Amino acid sequence: MASIFTRIVNGEIPCHKVAESSRYLAFLDINPLVKGHTLVIPKEEIDYVFDLSDDLLGGLMVFSKKVAKAIEATIPCQRVGVTVIGLEVPHAHVHLIPMESMADINFQNPKLSLSNDELAEIAIQLQNNF
């Protein structure tokens, strides 16, 4: 069965798309730690990030860097934190999280509850800075 991320790639589930290439997709986390929390995935469904080919992993990081630059240009923050946890969804993914302090990247924090309209507006702003 396809992961939820593969279903997003295939257009079966909507997302707030930030950026896309032939091999990668970036979209807003619908349960963000902070505004601008973005997920970056390879379109190819591979569960574990360290099972990605060197080429796919390298490309994921380069694509993530471009997305992080768009986040920095859009969301006031000291920097964009990067985490790869990989237990929530069996599809390799990178979390890009705008942060002012280490507390902003703590996954034990309560998640924000943003409306669909708020997420859509953030996605548009990020797209414009990508």
Image: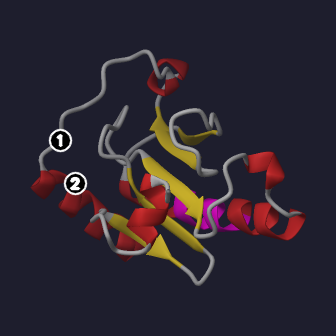
- Specify whether residue 127 is painted magenta: no
Say which element carries label 1: loop
58 left or right, relative to 111: right
Query: Mark 1: which amino acid?
Result: Leu
The numbered disc on residue 74 is none
Query: Mark 2: which amino acid?
Result: Leu
Which residue reaches farthest right? Answer: 54
Q: Quadrant of residue 55?
A: bottom right
- Residue 48, x across and y down, in percent: 72, 46
Which residue reaches farthest front? Answer: 1
Report if the CB atoms under discs 2 and 1 are less than 8 Å apart: yes
Name the N-terminal-most of marks 2 and 1: 1
Q: Foreground residue, 87 or 72?
A: 87
Residue at x-position 18% and y-position 34%: 113
- Residue 88, x across and y down, in percent: 51, 35
Mark 1 surroundings within 10 Å by alpha-carbon count, few (fewer than 14), some (14 through 19), many (20 or more) = some
Residue at x-position 37% and y-position 72%: 127
**Where is mark 1, residue-wise?**
114
Mark 2 surroundings within 10 Å by alpha-carbon count, few (fewer than 14), some (14 through 19), many (20 or more) = many
12 left or right, relative to 64: left
- Residue 110, x across and y down, in percent: 31, 19
Q: Which residues are magenta?
A: 62-68
- Residue 57, x across and y down, in percent: 78, 60
The numbered disc on residue 119 is 2
